[in-house]
Amino acid sequence: MTNSERDGRGASPRHGQDDGRGASPRHGQDDSRGASPRRRGQGELEAQVLAALRQAPGARTAGWVQERLGGGLAYTTVITILTRLHVKGAVSRERAGRSFEWTAVADEAGLAALRMRKVLDGEADRDAVLTSFVTGLSAHDERLLRDLLAQEPGEAED
């Protein structure tokens, strides 16, 4: 018998196991006592962060974004998403003391377009990818694409 068994402490439970006293498993683990949190779709959190920034009247801090989104997101998670959006060119940032203030420079459609360009840039045969993409479009989308390509550079559709 070990000293901890003699004095009633018992062996410590392994990581993630119930210790018999009703203590929860460590952070981030499903303890099977309640519904596990819903897993977000790819890009969903980026879209939410971008939407929050687009609603802001000016540049905002990561803390402001975190408060806007609610849902218990960690500050570091918000910083990670903002940094990824910055790398993609969807947000800009300006130094504000020891932190940054962030501004949206793209909307959700712009973010989707950035993702599409990234996929295209990662392919060796751009012609084949674009050909396959265009031949898979619906008649309506093909017409829209043709109309967009026929516009003069800088001409925007409202």
Image (spheres, rainbow, N blue to C red):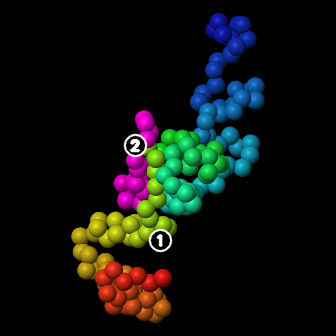
| Along the viewing direction, whichever of 90 and 22 lies nearer the viewer | 90
On the image, the x and y values in percent for residue 133 come to 37, 81
Circle 1: element type:
helix
Distance in Å between CA atoms under marks 2 and 1 = 27 Å
- Left or right of 20 on screen, residue 142: left
Q: Is residue 80 shown above or below 17?
A: below
| Along the viewing direction, whichever of 125 and 86 lies nearer the viewer | 86
Residue at the extreme front? 57
Query: Which amino acid does the dot numbered 2 rest on?
Result: Arg
Label drawn at residue 109: 1
Residue 5 on the magenta span = no
Circle 2: element type:
strand
Is residue 16 in sight in this rendering?
no
Residue 93 on the magenta span = yes
Label drawn at residue 88: none
Is residue 103 in sight in this rendering?
yes
| Along the viewing direction, whichever of 73 and 94 lies nearer the viewer | 94
* Residue name at image x 61 percent, y 52 percent: 69
Q: Which residue is mark 2?
A: 95
Give the crowd class for mark 1: few <14, some 14-19, many >=20 residues within 10 Å.
few
On the image, the x and y values in percent for residue 98 come to 42, 35
* Residue name at image x 62 percent, y 51 percent: 68
Query: Which amino acid does the dot numbered 1 rest on?
Result: Ala
On the image, the x and y values in percent for residue 104 come to 46, 59
Give the crowd class for mark 2: few <14, some 14-19, many >=20 residues within 10 Å.
few
Q: Quadrant of the N terminus?
A: top right
Question: In which quadrant of the rendered view does residue 117 lie?
Answer: bottom left
* Residue name at image x 39 percent, y 91 percent: 147
On the image, the x and y values in percent for residue 63 come to 55, 43
* Residue name at image x 65 percent, y 48 percent: 71
What is the span of residues highlighted in magenta in the rendered image? 82-99
